[in-house]
Every structure is written in C-alpha cells, then in structure tokens.
Amino acid sequence: MSSSTAASGTGPVTDAAPLSLCAREPHVPADRLVAEMVPPPRFDSVRFSTYIPDPNQPSQSEAVRVLEGFAAGLGGAPDAGRRRLFGFGKAAKKAPAGPRGVYLDGGYGVGKTHLLASLWHATPAEPERKAFGTFVELTNLVGALGFQQTVQTLSGHRLLCIDEFELDDPGDTVLVSTLLGKLVDAGVALAATSNTLPGKLGEGRFAAADFLREIQGLSAHFRTLRIDGEDYRHRGLPEAPPPFSDAQVTKAAHATEGASLDDFAHLLEHLARVHPSRYGALTDGIRAVCLTGVRPVPDQSTALRLVVLADRLYDREVPVLASGLPFDRLFSEEMLKGGYRKKYFRAISRLTALARDAGRLAGTE
C-alpha cells in the first residue's frame, strides 16, 4: 500500500481498512449493563475541583458548595432500609428523613454532567455501591433484569445518579419514578438532571417544575439546585469547523488506527436496526468516527437516535471527522422549534466539540 500521507500531518496510510459502524450489531448482556453504570470515560477524572465556575454565574459556585456537602453526608450505609424493603428484621430503622436527593436544574452545556459525575466520585463508597447512568440506560437495565431484580440490584447502593432524566415518555417516567420510590425506601440517595418536556420551548429554560411534577410523590426527596450559565463548550471557542471533502475524510480514516468510515445516510439506517442501549457498545474500540455525506436528518425518530449516538460519542471522547453539511444544519427549523429542541441543540453542541477534536486527523491543527 502507498506510504503517502492520508492528509497533511496524519502519517502514512495504514495497511488495514477502516472499521465500519454499519457492520456492527453488538449484543450487550445484562451484567455489562450493571458494571457499566459508572461515569463515562470523558468524566473519569472530573472532580469538583476541576469544575470552573463562571464568575458571572454565582449559582455555579453555590452548586459546587452544596454538592460537596451532600456527598460528605452520604457516609451512612443504606442497609437498614434494604432490610425493611425485603422484610429482613422487624426493628429495621427507617430511611433518613428529609431530602435524600438533589436535582441539578439548568440548560445544556452548563456542566450538569460534570457536577453529577463529581458527586459520584466524591461520595464515600466503593464503586460497586454507587451507580451512574442516563435515564435510557436505567430503563434498559429494568428491561434486561426485570423490575424486582433491578430493585434488589440497586437497593444496596449508597447513591444513584441519573443523567438526562427523560420527561417526554410518560410510561418510562412512571416506571422509573416507581423504581426510585423503592430505592428511596431502601435508603439510597438520588441525584438527577433532566430534559425539558415536549412543547416547552426556550433553550435556557429550566425544567425543575416539570421534573418534580412528573416524579410526583418523590418530589419531597429532592433539593433543587439551579445552575445558570451559557454552554461552556462555546465560551471563547471558535465556530464549528467547516466540513471536509469526501476524499479528505476517507484518506484520514485510512491513516488513523481504529477509525471507522461510514456513509452518513447508511449509518442512520443502521441505527434504526440497533437498540439505543447498544450504541455505547457500537463504538467499542473506535478511536475516531469518519462520516461522508452528512445531510439533514429526514425525520424526528431518526433525529432522536442520532442524539443518543452523539451522547455516547461525546461521553467516550471520540472525535468525528465529516464531509457534507456542517453539524448545525442537521436538524430542520421545525425540529429546532419543537418539543425536542433542547436535545437537538445539545447534540449540535456536542458534535461540534467532537468535530473540533477531529481537526488533527486531517492535519488542520
């Protein structure tokens, strides 16, 4: 094979052909779903000390202070509540009174996930007694284990963190709210962020009222922390880089070990055949995603699947190099004004950040 460079600064073309996300149909066993309920790789090293509050937004510094105190107060074990839940012992103590949960309320990009992961890291418990996952990952766990087994699996935990609590699916919201009620009875502390309900417009809109109303009887267990601010991913950063040509993307994919190369339209079709709970596994071992022919997504179902993939790529810090249209033109004006507007803006923000990261693959850094 030619030793010419794939693109300026990317090195020689590799002997192996690029990988393909479209060729993957991963199976994810239930025990992996449990074991992977930890902060994703992007948030492995985050701590409260690495969160940089915006000096113009005092609520950010206040949130750090409150969460540090909340973590410090989680030193007690939930075993007494667990015994009561499953009938072990007649004199089991009741779960602690007062709020046993915190809800981080703010727009996208203000660092809610950073703070949620920092809380997980700061809580004084072994990793196997703390769980961290998105709402989708939690519902997938219930689907894999069954409701009662999920309660038993999580009831011995000291803390459950739920990122991006979905308020747009009434059935799943009731299911998870019921699960959380059981876990609160077992003495498990809770922390959550949420998405805005469909029809609630405004990218900076806060969703605390929606969240507390949807979890109904659990609302008394949550203290709301409002976090004001702009999307940190665009503070002082340049605009999204322009797309590359198909030839540049293909060349870079061949020159980058562990890169995947797919046609964007074909990838969207493939995502419809893979359950979103498997999108993380879909990217196992992928060090860069190269896409040709990026174009607007055709419908809302496809758009929502792409949002999930963008989240998984962002969590795993996988750069995305693409040709076609820039990522801020993925979603139609109608989509960006509709009920899922907040999700689409988050996806644009995250894909833009990953596109910046991918500049080195094409020798632009």
Image (cartoon, helix red, strand yellow):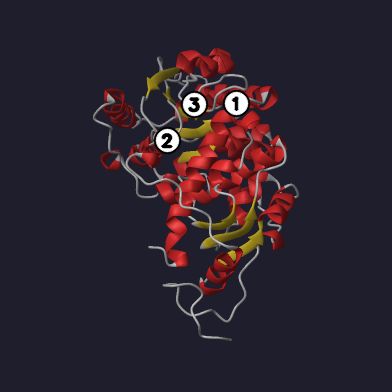
Question: Mark 2 or mark 1, which is nearer to you?
Answer: 1
Residue assigned mark 3: 203
**Residue at the farthest left position:** 55
Density class for disc 2 (Cα within 10 Å; few <14, some 14-19, many ≥20) is: some
Q: Using the rendered view, name the quadrant where residue 224 is placed.
A: top left
**Foreground: 238 or 175?**
238
What amino acid is labelled 1 in the image? Lys
Report how far apart the C-alphas of labels 2 and 3 lie in the structure: 11 Å
Density class for disc 3 (Cα within 10 Å; few <14, some 14-19, many ≥20) is: some
Q: Position of residue 79 (x, y in %)?
A: 46, 31
The structure residue drawn at horizontal position 37% and vertical position 35%, both measured from the top left corner, is 115
Q: Position of residue 216 (x, y in %)?
A: 57, 13
Residue assigned mark 1: 337
Q: Is residue 222 left or right of residue 26?
A: left
With respect to residue 92, does 321 lie above or below? below
Q: Secondary structure at mark 3?
A: loop
